[in-house]
Amino acid sequence: MEDLLYKMAITRIPKVGGVLAKNLISYCGGAEAVFRAKKRELLKVPGIGEGIAKNILTQNVLHEAEAEMFWVEQQNIQPLFYLDDNYPQRLRHYDESPLMLYYKGTAELNAERVVAIVGTRSPTSRGKAICEELVAGLKDYGVMIISGLAYGVDVTAHRKCLAVGIPTVGVLGHGLDKIYPVENKKTALEMMQQGGVLTEFSYKTDPDRQHFPMRNRIIAGMCDALIVVETAKRGGSIISAELANSYNKDVFAVPGRLKDKWSKGCNHLIKTHKAALIEHAGDVAYIMRWEKGKSSKTAAQTQLFVQLSEAEQRVVDILKLADETSIDKLTFQAGMNPSQISSVLLNLEFKGLVKTLPGKRFMLY
């Protein structure tokens, strides 16, 4: 528990984000070591200047973290450090991933298949109906659905998940001591029993405007596929889609009529090849190569007679245990970063051992 105190305290140091916090921990040798370090040692860490060093040395954040740790325990909230096994593994390999997440719920955050559904806060009746149809159609593919618990498309997706029995997680732009918007509080409480709510923000953090784009990177990073239902050409949904593309996720969009305001964003994503056009859940499953039901874990009987490096052999051994798997899951299981896993997979393709499938998935020949 003492180690948790220091981990939580680092997130409260002013002007220290996820990247710099990870550098501090790496250079100092642990979260507690950051607060034991001398000023001269802190100043050797890239990005740490006099101001940040002073904030660390005064250790005021330790008192704040102690109060929050007590509150988290009382509220049955799970703090997830970025090196923990139950931290969302699809997210952790990105440099900008949060150092700490706070989670309250029952769903497995590292579910086999994760779909994000996003869209405007003011959807048309058509948009709501399409969103509900997509959610219902995805149930047979054993997915978990994530969104932002905002008005409109987000909460429509969450509520339909609750109605049809799909685990659903809402990623919030504030601390877990409140639910915003308050109109969605009942839905959030139900989600804690059939999914959960997740945030990177400490308790007593208000839903400030700048927090929601930050929230969107978590949604984009946690999913295998991101679906945009209705949106204008600018806004949070477009930010989420752009982030998902930058993270090499599969992005889908529902097309609409040319003159409709809330179709312009989706149509633009499709036109610029930043999203695949979909009409129903089956289109997502086809591109992702998902069969109905949860994917089986039968061992592949592949005989290999090619000399492999240690990293290549590690990836091959993982693929032997699955019919096919995603690049995100491979990255996590192999303990590599995205650039390393991409290089290894390319070498294995050249050697004729690995086949690339649609949806950034891979299998052994």
Image (cartoon, helix red, strand yellow):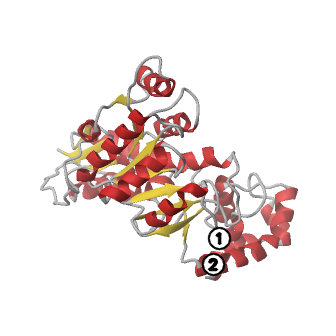
Residue type of the residue flagged with mark 1 = Lys
Q: Quadrant of the N terminus?
A: bottom right
Along the line of sight, which residue is nearer the eye, 120 or 323?
Answer: 120
Q: Which mark is residue 120?
A: none
Give the structural element (helix, strand or loop) at label 1. helix
Expressed as whole percent of the image width and height from the top left, the position of residue 189 reads 49, 66
Disc 2 target residue: 3
* 357 relative to 32 in the view: left or right: left
Residue 344 visible, this orientation: yes
Expressed as whole percent of the image width and height from the top left, the position of residue 136 reads 29, 48
Give the structural element (helix, strand or loop) at label 2. helix
Q: How many marks?
A: 2
Callout 2–callout 1 Cβ contact below 8 Å: yes
* 65 relative to 217 in the view: left or right: right
Q: Residues within 10 Å of mark 1 (few under 14, many from 20)?
A: many
Disc 1 target residue: 7
How far apart are the alpha carbons under marks 2 and 1? Answer: 6 Å
Vertical placement of 62 versus 94: above or below?
below
Residue 336 visible, this orientation: no
Along the line of sight, which residue is nearer the eye, 56 or 221?
Answer: 221
Q: Residue at x 51, y 24 (%)?
A: 261
Q: Residue at x 32, y 31 (%)?
A: 278
Vertical placement of 149 versus 346: above or below?
below
Expressed as whole percent of the image width and height from the top left, the position of residue 52 reads 82, 59
Q: Residue at x 43, y 39 (%)?
A: 248
* 315 relative to 242 in the view: left or right: left
